[in-house]
Image (cartoon, rainbow, N blue to C red):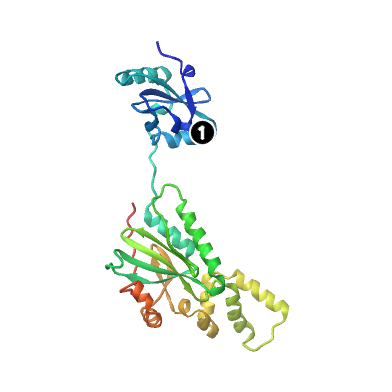
Amino acid sequence: MLQDFSNLPYLNLIDKQKLPEYSAIYFAVASGQVLYIGQAVNLRNRWQNHHRLPQLEAINRRCQVKLFWLNCLQNELNELERQYIQFYCPTLNQTKVPQKNLSPSFQMLTLSLKKLNERVLVFGICPASEKLPLKTLVIGYLANYTETRLATTLVRKSLQAVNRKPNSLFRWIEYDRLRNGARWLTRCNGIETRLIPWFQERIMHNPSMYSVMEEKRFGVWSSIPLDEYEKMRQDVKAMSFTERLELARNSEIGWKLFPLECGSQLRVVSGVKILCLTSEQLEILVDKHPYIQEQHPGICAIDEDPVPKLLF
């Protein structure tokens, strides 16, 4: 005769690491309803990575799930499991295990670049080498020296938000954290992407753009009424990135403040339109800062999307 599960020993699901280490038939129960019945040669080990654990943990957030067990010999497991399943007809024993639909890495990299688009600039792509085992995309996030810590924090929060996305194996790794900014990397479809700090005024930094708008509206040497200046500030804050870029490119001050952004071109990277250095810009930059070439040997400007679109 089958035993009533309610007379058996039990533990709450969250205490599964305390389960005994012997063979048993187990019952997952919530609100008096048997949800799942199974067998285990070693009960504790079975529940360390049970295929129904995600479902039961989700149920446990709404109502407490308990694990009951019946100690038995190993040669009795199959028959007892069959009898108990037939008797209780547990819900989960009659359903398939849900399959996780993993988000492709390409989509997660695209999401990352969309979040950072107005703050970053693609320097170029490096071929695989002894120093860089994978083809490497180098992206700089722009910040002037006064906002380095803030910029680093904002980038970190954006990347952490991407890392927290469910059903994804894609991850950004913070591989270096210095006083002058942090550095991250990720790998996607055979390409390594590195995100490094670069110290320069950026178009989306409002105080810098005030000077550009001031030149356009009032000239360089004009004194500006306070109410007009405040209206100008509000207009700048309301401008999109594209509008700011166009304004800066049509301004002498804009070219002085934002030489990299003004001279760069929009290219597609991982499906996202993003500002990328031209070959001429990169050559000048490498001549001025030789360490760029030392750290990223063979770096060259990109002409087409360097990230293969493999949806898995």
On the rendered image, what quadrant is the N terminus found in? top left
Specify the amino acid type for callout 1. Answer: Asn
| Residue 280 seen anywhere in this rendered image of the structure | yes
Q: Secondary structure at mark 1?
A: helix
Residue furthest top as drawn:
1
Q: Quadrant of residue 55?
A: top left
Q: Nearer the viewer, residue 139 or 211?
A: 139
Query: Count of labels shown?
Result: 1
Q: Position of residue 264 (x, y in %)?
A: 43, 76
Q: Which residue is mark 1?
A: 60
Compared to residue 120, the image places residue 3 above or below, namely above
Residue at point 46%, 78% (across, down): 260
Above or below for 85 versus 157: above
Q: Residue at x 40, y 35 (%)?
A: 48
Q: Camera-side residue: 17 or 238? A: 17
Can residue 301 be seen by looking at this rendering?
Answer: no
In the figure, is residue 149 to the left or right of 91? Answer: right
Q: Count neighbours of disc 1 (C-alpha within 10 A) and say few if under 14, some if 14 to 19, many if 20 or more.
A: some
Residue at image location 51% in from the left, 83% down from the top: 256
Location of residue 139 in the rendering, given as x and y in whole percent from the top left corner? 41, 68
Quarter-of-image position of residue 21: top left
- Say left or right for 211 vs 24: right
Residue name at image x 41 percent, y 20 percent: 70
Q: Nearer the viewer, residue 303 or 189?
A: 189
In the rendered image, residue 298, in percent from the top left (x then y), is placed at 30, 74
Q: Position of residue 114 (x, y in %)?
A: 46, 62
Question: Residue 75 sits in which quadrant?
Answer: top left
